[in-house]
Image (cartoon, grey):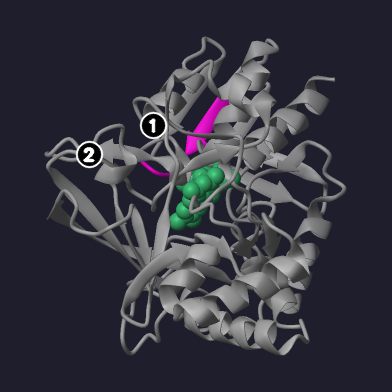
Amino acid sequence: MKYDVIIAGAGYAGAVSARCLAEAGKQVLVLEKRDHIGGNAYDAYDDNGVRRHVYGPHLFHTNNGNVVDFLSRFTDWYPYEHRVLGYIEGKTVPIPFNLTSIEKLFDPETADHLKTELIKAYGMERKVPILELRKNEDPAINQLAEYIFEHVFKYYTMKQWGYGAEEIDPAVTARVPVHVSYDDRYFQDAYQMMPKDGYTAMFKCMLDHDGITVVTGCDVMEHIRIDTEQHQVLYDGEAFTGEFIYTGLVDQLLEYRYGDLPYRSLEFDVQEETKGFQPAATVNYPTPAEIHPFTRISDYGMMMESCPEKTASAVEYPYAYSRNGEKGTVPYYPVFTDASKEQYARYAELLKDIPNVHLLGRLAEYRYYNMDSITERALEVCGSLIG
Ligand SMILES: Cc1cc2nc3c(=O)[nH]c(=O)nc-3n(C[C@H](O)[C@H](O)[C@H](O)COP(=O)(O)OP(=O)(O)OC[C@H]3O[C@@H](n4cnc5c(N)ncnc54)[C@H](O)[C@@H]3O)c2cc1C
């Protein structure tokens, strides 16, 4: 074996690690089971020149200058600030729900009263998780909180996660808090931009290094087995003593011995559309599944530097992940419940005495990472491997 490091997966976790270790002089082999690099950030152009994000819309935003500096070595950027509208009672209003949303949904007198009370209670520019807002005992705020819960969170969470908003980890609903502000942008981060030629081009440049060999269309499980008895990694039956960075599903790596970890999956119905077919790059449908069985519709053209006349929409339908099913065969989001967290901990425990195995990324670590936070994490892990 001529490689110092084997990496399973060519998404952010795998590609950032590969580049970082190759620059430290390591020979790195990246095995990617899909037929392309980029992981879930993979994008490709359609016949109309629309850059489609094949695994759902990916918007880059961060406050981390180090992450921007690292990624900027592999791409130029164009500024892009994402805006989302939610379809509520026949109107489209800003999401995260904010002071403009109140003005659009209530008569002027009620809206003024609600806005005054909210600002008095929390101050301007505060982000308040819905579950926290619902605990507020002021009658006006409490009524507003129940309204927002019903019209923004209740059905959307049920459709997206298959669980009620109160059953799932509170961090999930806290990700889209109520915003006491007139700022209609979906994110408020200091850096909000998109790679000039797309994510795939950025990954291609990142993986282009003499020390990196990439093989796509290769499931690492065809070669690697974890021997938990002898605490070793086997590559084609031989002990591999280099570093093994795994960014795939941990239950797959350990042959599902404690059962399948639950994930949420998505299916995308992609259609050709005319520019301006909807009023924002993404429109959410927080309505009951009987009315709209999907969660959101995105316009990929609006996410480009300039939107082509013929653009493409993606309608998102959530499913429970099933590795052998007909739909929902891609694991997108870990489903955080007490039981799943405990199940993951049992898997991780099996690997703790095998020091050359490193679980990294949203699948292997069973946690939600944005693109910036997984870049930061990969740089940190590889920094400590390099010493
Ligand atoms: C629908 C959706 C929208 C998102 N939108 C945003 C956004 O707007 N902004 C943002 O910052 N983040 C967003 N994210 C998060 C972003 O996708 C993740 O931060 C990023 O993909 C994490 O990178 P990763 O390398 O950990 O995982 P992945 O991108 O999933 O990469 C893992 C790779 O490992 C490969 N692999 C798995 N098992 C094996 C195996 N056995 N052998 C070989 N290869 C294997 C997979 O094929 C995959 O290519 C979004 C996520 C989803 C699901």
Residue type at tag 2: Cys
Q: Identify the residue shown where x is 29% and y is 47%.
A: 300
Residue 38 rendering spot, x and y as whole percentages: 44, 36
- Tell me if I can see residue 356 in this picture: yes
Distance from the alpha carbon under mark 1 to that under mark 2: 19 Å
Kindly state the secondary structure of the residue where label 2 is placed. Answer: loop
Viewer-proximal residue among 285 and 249: 285
In the rendered image of this protein, does residue 383 appear above or below residue 361? Answer: above
Q: Quadrant of residue 295?
A: bottom left
- Tell me if I can see residue 328 in this picture: no
Q: Dot 2: within a 10 Å radius of its alpha carbon, few (fewer than 14), some, or many (20 or more) residues?
A: some
Quadrant holding the N terminus: top right
Q: Quadrant of residue 180?
A: bottom right
In the rendered image of this protein, does residue 299 appear above or below residue 12? Answer: below
Side of 346 relative to 298 (left or right):
right
Residue 370 rendering spot, x and y as whole percentages: 59, 47
Q: Which mark is drawn over residue 307?
A: 2
Kindly state the secondary structure of the residue where label 1 is placed. Answer: helix
Q: Nearer the viewer, mark 1 or mark 2?
A: 2
Residue at label 1?
200
Residue type at tag 1: Thr
Residue 110 rendering spot, x and y as whole percentages: 53, 82
Mark 2, ligand 1, within 8 Å: the answer is: no
Q: Identify the residue shown where x is 20% and y is 51%.
A: 312
Q: Which residues are magenta?
A: 29-35
In the rendered image of this protein, does residue 362 appear above or below residue 381? Answer: below
Q: Quadrant of residue 349?
A: bottom right
CB atoms of marks 1 and 2 within 8 Å: no
Q: Identify the residue shown where x is 66% and y is 41%.
A: 373
